[in-house]
Structure formats: C-alpha cells, structure tokens
Image: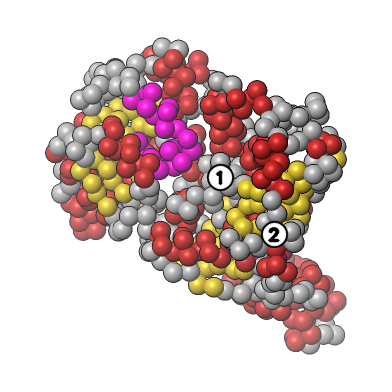
Amino acid sequence: MRLIFSYMNKFEELGLGEAIIKAVNDMGFETPSEVQEKAIPILLDQDTDIVALAQTGTGKTAAFGFPLIEKIDSKSRITQGLILSPTRELCLQITNELKNYSKFVPGLNTVAIYGGASITDQAKQIKRGAQIVVATPGRMQDMINRKLVDISNIGYCILDEADEMLNMGFYEDINAILSHTPDDKSTWLFSATMPREVSTIAKRFMHDPVEITVGHKNTGSKNVSHEYYVVNSRDRYAALKRLADANPDIFSVVFCRTKRDTQKVAENLIVDGYNAAALHGDLSQNQRDLVMKSFRNRQIQMLVATDVAARGIDVDDVTHVINYQLPDEIETYTHRSGRTGRAGKSGVSMVIVSKSEIRKIKSVERIIKKSFEKKEIPSGEEICQVQLFHLASDIGKAEINHEIDSYLPSINEVLEEFSKEELIKKFFSVEFSRFHNYYKKSRDLNVVNDRDRESRSDDGSTRYFINVGEKDGFDWMTLKDFLKETLGLGRDALSRVDVKENFSFFNTSSEQQETVLSVFEDFKMDGRKVNVEVSKDSGRRSGGGRRRRDNDGGGYKGKRRSDGFKPKGKKRFGSDSQSGDNQRRDRRKRSDRR
C-alpha cells in the first residue's frame, strides 16, 4: 500500500484529476517520465503553445494525453481536440492509449481516422460524437474535403512525431488541415528531433511556444548502445544472419530503406529458417495487424520493416535494432534506435555498412551525440560456441516433464551402453549439427575488398556503367530522369550523365554507391536485365557536357519498362506541368519508403 500511495502522489503532484489518477493506478504506472513531469503541469495550467522534444519511447503520448483529457468537455459532442500522427499504426496506438487513460471519464469518445479502413464507418463514428479525433494527415484531409468532419471549433491541436510527418512529405497536408482550425487554439508539437522543417512549422503555426527538451536535441536514448559492422556490399545479408545467430535471444526490428528490400530480406530470412516477417505499406491493414500481433506475442523474432511502417511499433522488449541499410535522412536514425532501450531497459542498435558509408556513421554520431563502437562480424567458430552454450543454458533451465517417466526404462535400455559424457556429446551433436555444418567452412566477412577505391573520382563521386543507351530511347535528360526516379535520389544527386548508343555512364556521390548497386541488382526493363556496374572511367572527359548542349530533351522511341515508367521528350520538361510531375515523383518516392 505504501508503494501505491507514493506513486499516486507523484502523479497527483502534477495536477491531474481523480479520473486520470484512477486510470494511472489501474494501468500500473509507477513514476512520471521526464517529459511528463515537464509538460503536464504547463499544459494543465496554461492555454499555451508548446514544443516538446523527447526521444521515442519516453512517454510522450501520456504527456499530451493526460492534459488533453482533463481539458476536454465530455458533456459536449463537438470535436474539441485533434491529434495528427504520421502512420495508421501510430494513430491506432494513440487512440487505444487515450481510451485507456479516459476510461473513468463518462461520455468521452476518441475516434481514429486513417487510410486503409472504411471512410464511411469512420464518418459515422464522428457523427455519433467524438470529442477527440486522432488522424493521419492524408485521411484527415480527405474527410475535410468531403465535409465529413468539422474541426472549426477545436481548442487543441497536437502534432505527434512532427519530424516524421514532415519527413514523409505531409507539410502541405498539415498546412491545409490547420487552415480549417481556429486561430486561438493551442498547438502542442511533440517530436523526437528538431530538424529545420520542424522549426519552420513551429514558427508558422505557433505563437510564442514554450519549449521543453528532454536530454539534448536530436539525441538518442541513453539506454541504447550503438555498433557498426563494415562488410562488402554483397555480404550484407550474410552479415545480418550472423548477427542474428550470434544473439540467440534476439527480438529485433530490422530496418530497410524500401518496401522492395524489406520484402526480399524477410522472405530470405523465412526461407533460411528464421522467425521473420515483413512490415511495409503494401500490406493491407489486416495483414499489418496480424504481423504486429505475432511480433508482440514473440512468434516473430525478426521484424523487417520500413521506417514509415515501423512508426507504430510500441513494444518494450525489443533487444536489438538492426540497420540493414542506413536511412536516407540522418535524423531518421534516432527514430529507429528508439525502438529499443524502452521503459528503462537496455538495447543495442547495430548498423551494417559498406566502406563507402563509413562517413555517414560520423554524421549520425554528431546528430545523436553518441559514439559508435566498431565491431567485427562474428566468425563461424564464435557463433557455434555461442549457440552451443545457449543450448546448454536452455537445457539447464528447462522444466522436467514427468509424463515421460513411464518411458524412462525403455529409454535407459537403449542408451545404457553409453557413458554420461558420450550421451551429452550425442545429444548436442543432434541439436547442434545444423550450425556446425553451416559455419564450419565460413569465411571472414570483415575482409573488405579495396577494389572500389580506383572507381572514385577526385571529387568523392563514383562513376557507373549501365547497359542502356540511345538504342533504348534515352538521351542524357531522359536517362537522368529515369535514374532519379528509380533510385529515389535528389535533384542534384546525379552528374556527368553520358549516353552512348548501347550503354551509358553516370556519377553519384560515393555514399550512394550501395544504394545504386542494390536497386539495380535484379532490375529488368522490357524483360531485359538492366546491369549497373562501377566503372573505372573517371567521367572527366568533355563528351558529357557537349551531349547536354546537343540533346535538349526528346528522343524516347516509345519503349516502356515493365513497371510502367515511360521517359518522355522535352515537352514534359518545358511545359507548365513540370511541378506536377515533380510532385507525383516525390509522392512515389515517399510511397516506396513505406
């Protein structure tokens, strides 16, 4: 009783009412987190805008959820609070948590609005009365356009995971949504990092906000250690398997950049005997729910996910985060590593990189203000040793099933000729052979081939050969556009595009080398494999520049790739539709990251 009284007093000291305290007690919360201690008193006592920066997994939902519930008039049916979140999973997670927080508040209704579910059913829930609406920006904008929801009278707007929403390209949606809200509302912005875009939205939509920072801006959790492993590009998947085998109790999230890589890695892991599954935007809502249920129940040991899909993962026991590929945006690493080391537990964030990506590690270190430890991929012998002792430990901890007692005389008769030592060896040989046979001739993955050094130009870029050219209907402009869209690279990421009759060359920064080679690993166009290799040509010749002046667009002869992309002529680039084309390309790029 003393413990309960003590912990209740800690929340009561924040100014929370009886209904919230009762819910807190019922859920077993023991101590307010730092962000809760800082934010809740301010939000309860003042009608103010606030910017709260805190690492993922620090209790931000309660930090804004408790004060919001206190301020809502549950006797009124109008919508008074709007919470915007980046993904369906996070939207549902916030909704469920708010329902738990408000279960002792009569008449308070929280409704989730998100894509992938019936918009008609969601509109009916709103019409019945929803004081709090939790929504993804895209579905919210759709419902506003259809006049299915009214947010003209809200008093509170919460932007949760603001940095991720902006990183996903929702700035225009947020701008449009907020234009339908009152000017005198209170805006609460919660974010794990503070990139320039978040500062911009704070200045535009908020009035003299109070800023709360837990730890330092953009830093990672203090409970997470960071490691990186350097391998050849071709050995990335083999390295992932070794890291999993070297940690037999691993319960992990494996991050890939694209939906395609996510699905491919998950399928390979399943074929190789691992309890794995993919989580990305191409799955239906029902499929995603089933995957997350299996993951929470630990039926899945390795969840392979895109950054966007993983925003809704709220599991406290994740032991490892494995960055199969580093994210395009450095700040995204903070969100990834925040999937582990939650609720006071320790966690490990691993990064698998090629030599060309090592510089990115230094950039991440500056952002999260933590140092990475360079580690070696375990050898086959080391993995066998780990697995052997893990098996012995499991046997030692196993409970005896006495239902086998009746069979013991017959078993003893079969095994009576063997000594204790021989029996142990035989038993472990049966259980252990798979690992031993697989790893007995394994090579050292840490030996990195330096052959790629000669392909780098003096300016730090890499030159590539690609087996398409003028005969495929490309000139330098249409090829550059094709490469930008296929690779998901920025406007200035490609240079020195030189198109020949049967093949072409192009340059990217050396940091993008792994991305370029992996995207074109199994790529086909019109049923023909498109081959991209690192070239020894430095790209310093002047031919590329002359070709740019001679070919100002046009030239595509009507061939179409198997995925439907069709480069077009100069009319596309010189017309008024250019900005629309760019926006559509941006949306496709964002979609591929989900």
On the image, numbered disc 2 is attached to which residue? 538
On the image, numbered disc 1 is attached to which residue? 492
Answer with the quarter of the image where residue 145 lies. Answer: top left
Crowd tier of the residue under label 1, counting other residues whose Cα lies within 10 Å: few below 14, some 14–19, many 20 or above: few
| Badge 2 amino acid | Ser
| Badge 1 amino acid | Asp
Q: Nearer the viewer, mark 1 or mark 2?
A: 2
Would you place residue 28 above or below residue 361 in this image?
above
Q: Position of residue 9 (x, y in %)?
A: 18, 51
Q: Position of residue 439 (x, y in %)?
A: 77, 73
Is 174 part of what is drawn in magenta? yes
Q: Nearer the viewer, residue 235 or 389?
A: 235
Q: Are marks 1 and 2 in contact (CB under 8 Å)?
A: no
Q: Which mark is residue 412?
A: none
Dominant SS in magenta: helix
The residue under the point 69% across, 59% down is: 538
Q: What kind of element bears circle 2?
A: loop
**What residue range appears in magenta?**
159-178
Q: Position of residue 285 (x, y in %)?
A: 58, 32
Task: Report whether residue 186 is seen.
Answer: yes
Residue 425 falls left or right of residue 329: right
Measured in 3D between alpha carbons, the distance from the residue under mark 1 to the one under mark 2, in whole angstroms, is 18 Å
Q: Position of residue 56 (x, y in %)?
A: 40, 50
